[in-house]
Amino acid sequence: MIHLDTSFLIRALARGTGEDRLLRTWVREAQELGMSAVAWTEFLCGPVDSAVVQLALRVVADRPAFGDEDALLAAKLYNASGRRRGSSLDCMIAATALRAGASLATSNAHDFRRFEPEGQRLLGP
């Protein structure tokens, strides 16, 4: 299972990028792709038009909700990684991927490296 971060999905929808090439490979390989509802919300905040949303829906069929277990893990990640201002959404995205046992595809690895000690596996161009 691979969860996509918002940054990865945005860049993957731009033809010719490293993210586009990786995503196409994963689709060909029939990798199971997901994206937390939190990251999906970030994506929908756009700007993004309906055709792009429809394409993203076909690529990322699994968008698990953020639940109580995720909230506990996100708070743990937030506290363990230095309580950085503005990082709570990253903690929520990482928590959902960790709960799913998924690697996290991101274009902003520096935002998520601090979660690797907790087991987060990162993928990216």
Image: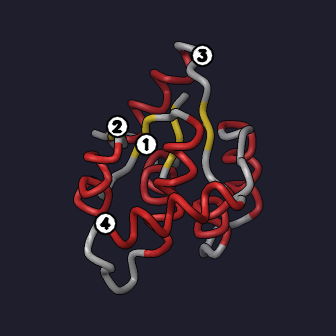
Q: Nearer the viewer, mark 1 or mark 3?
A: 1
Q: Residues within 10 Å of mark 1 (few under 14, many from 20)?
A: many
- 25, 16: nearer the viewer: 25
CB of mark 1 within 8 Å of CB of mark 4? no
Dividing the picture into quadrants, the one containing residue 18 is: top left
Identify the residue at image location x=53%, y=63%.
Answer: 92
Task: Give the residue number, with chain letter if any, for mark 4.
Answer: 80
Tell me the CA gap for discs 1 and 4: 19 Å
Numbered disc 2: secondary structure: loop
Crowding around mark 4 (Cα neighbors within 10 Å: few <14, some 14 to 19, many 20+) is some
Q: Are marks 2 and 1 in contact (CB under 8 Å)?
A: yes
Which of the two labelled residues, at mark 4 and mark 3, occupies the earlier sequence position?
3
Question: Between 66 and 7, which is closer to the camera in this rendering?
Answer: 66
Q: Which residue is mark 1?
A: 104
Give the foreground label among 3 and 2.
2
Q: Nearer the viewer, residue 20 or 83?
A: 83
Mark 4 secondary-structure assignment: helix
Residue 8 is situated, as x and y percent measured from the top left of the image, at: 43, 51
Q: Nearer the viewer, mark 4 or mark 3?
A: 4
Q: Who's the residue at 61% across and 25% down the image?
A: 32
Q: Which residue is mark 3?
A: 30
Using the numbered discs, state the Cα–Cα distance from disc 2 to disc 1 in whole angstroms.
Answer: 6 Å
Q: Secondary structure at mark 1?
A: strand
- The colour mode here is secondary structure
Q: Earlier in the sequence, mark 1 or mark 3?
A: 3
Q: Which mark is residue 14?
A: none
| Residue at far top of view | 29
Quadrant placement of the C terminus: top left
Relative placement, left or right, of 42 versus 62 is left
